[in-house]
Amino acid sequence: MVRKLQSDVVIVGGGIAGIAAALELLDRGMKVTLLDRDTPERFGGLARESFGGIFVVGSKEQRRLGIHDSPDLALRDWLSVAHLGEDDAWPGRWAEAYVNRCHEDVYTWLKACKVTFFPVVHWVERGLYGPGNSVPRFHMVWGTGHGLIEALVATLENHPRRSNLGMHFGCHINGLETSGGAVTGCSGVFEDTGEELVAHGDAVIVAAGGICGSLEKLHRHWYTPWGAPPAQLLNGAHRFGDGELQDLVEKLGGRITHLDLQWHYAAGIHHPHPDRERHGLSLVPPKSALWMNADGRRIGPMPLITAYDTRFLVEQILRQPGQYSWQVMNWKIATKELAVSGSEYNDAVRNKQFARFIREVLFGNPKLVERLAAECEDFVVADTVEGLAAGMNALTGENRVDPAVLEEEIRRYDANIARGPKLHNDEQLRRIAHCRQYRGDRVRTCKFQRILDLKARPLVAIRELILARKSLGGIETDLQSRALGRDGAPIPGLWAAGEAAGFGGGGIHGRGTLEGTFLGTSILTGRIAAQSL
């Protein structure tokens, strides 16, 4: 038996791009079939698991904090980290479109869907040696990515034309249907029953994510200047983000670009409760911790510190022995500064417990550190440097960390702190001082905390692996989100949005990103695809 589905538009992928497209199509009275491979409980894709930060230019929250921003400044910042090539016409046009449209078509639209934001805008990806985000633009959703998706799903379910939407889960799409040279639908199977399905429509929107959920594809398209992929690479991508839809589009003659440009994180740890191969969590690393290589030596000459340039962190660690790192700190630093980038371990924000959240901001989050130390294999806790080194060596099964070397590295840093701010001569301390000038960072960053401070122990070492997250390339699209063929012309009946389209144009971010731009561009490309239709 084959289950046949008919509608005006078929959307493949139930992530945030697919949801945004569905809402836009329903607003216009169209009948929509939305197909997703995951379960109904996971509707929303990787966005549901995310921290929920969205890049916005010129928001009310920015103005309230006295932050003067503009699309021109945002575009200059964007291009400064993207390093687009001469042939990257569509990514450049999409970047310009996003900075000019994100306020109205993402931020204001989300507020109409009853999404709320933190009053303090976060400042990430500031740029290490040159401009990154010149001003704070990372708008955190109250409720994290979980709350973001819940609000959009509620808008979808309560839509006055909800009857025009058919949603089907557990659908593995393995073919695109064509007729008369145009894409007219897709085919696949319901994985739980084995029943075949065919969904027909006047158009298909591919919004099925990227390639980083497939370690085989990720390795095949690995960025060659980085050398070989690390042996212990963790997976923070969606479990069904395997690039199969891009392969299908390519077989139809679609142009797939920049799959070697990927966005990974430097501070990945093994997920205590994995549900996919090499499942990892991404930490928000403490700024006051020492970032060390596998031998227990501080990475340099430029010390590694978060919030400035994530790609630089990844590149430096890939050049280190073992291609992994350690962050060494004490309990006080960990409870004050450590966080997990995602919804799962941010209970107070996810559950919108305001009083608890304020308490954690002001006094730290020892429960999070206790939970991770108890559940995660990458945490080592000890009262002495010698005990810490022994635990680090036991964890890796290698005798790489010499306790004397580790202690000397820590004491050298602590001695710099002890001289006082007027005599600080360490780039990490200068960056910490810079971060603490902004109110969004001051309350979450220790004031020059010595690591060997007896009052701040025990000591903590966290082994951190590279965590695969996003593929920055994908299906090349024009500014209407129409999928383009190898001849540069639109493929009739085929649109693409979100990560499947490289977040716009087959690679809107180029080589780097200003963060918060993944969710925002997924919303914008999904909405534009629907508006175009």
Image (cartoon, rainbow, N blue to C red):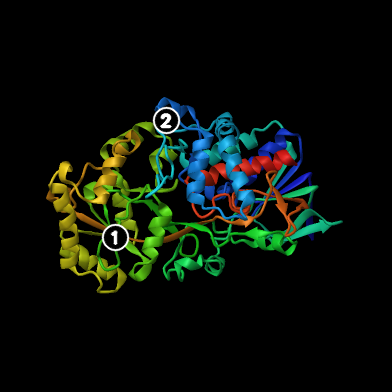
Residue under pointer 2: 67
Q: Nearer the viewer, residue 394 or 203?
A: 203
Characterize the local packing of mark 1: few (<14), some (14-19) or many (20 or more) Cα atoms within 10 angstroms.
few
Where residue 386 appears, as percent x and y from the top left, is: 16, 65
Say which element carries label 1.
loop
Q: How far is disc 2 from disc 1 in space, using C-alphas?
A: 33 Å
Q: Is residue 101 left or right of residue 224?
A: right
Q: Is residue 276 left or right of residue 26?
A: left
Q: Given the image, on which type of amino acid does mark 2 rest? A: Ile
Q: Residue at x 57, y 46 (%)?
A: 44
Q: Which quadrant would the N terminus be assigned to in this image?
A: bottom right
Where residue 520 appears, as percent x and y from the top left, is: 55, 42
Where residue 225 appears, as percent x and y from the top left, is: 47, 67
Q: Residue furthest top?
A: 64
Residue under pointer 1: 300
Characterize the local packing of mark 2: few (<14), some (14-19) or many (20 or more) Cα atoms within 10 angstroms.
some
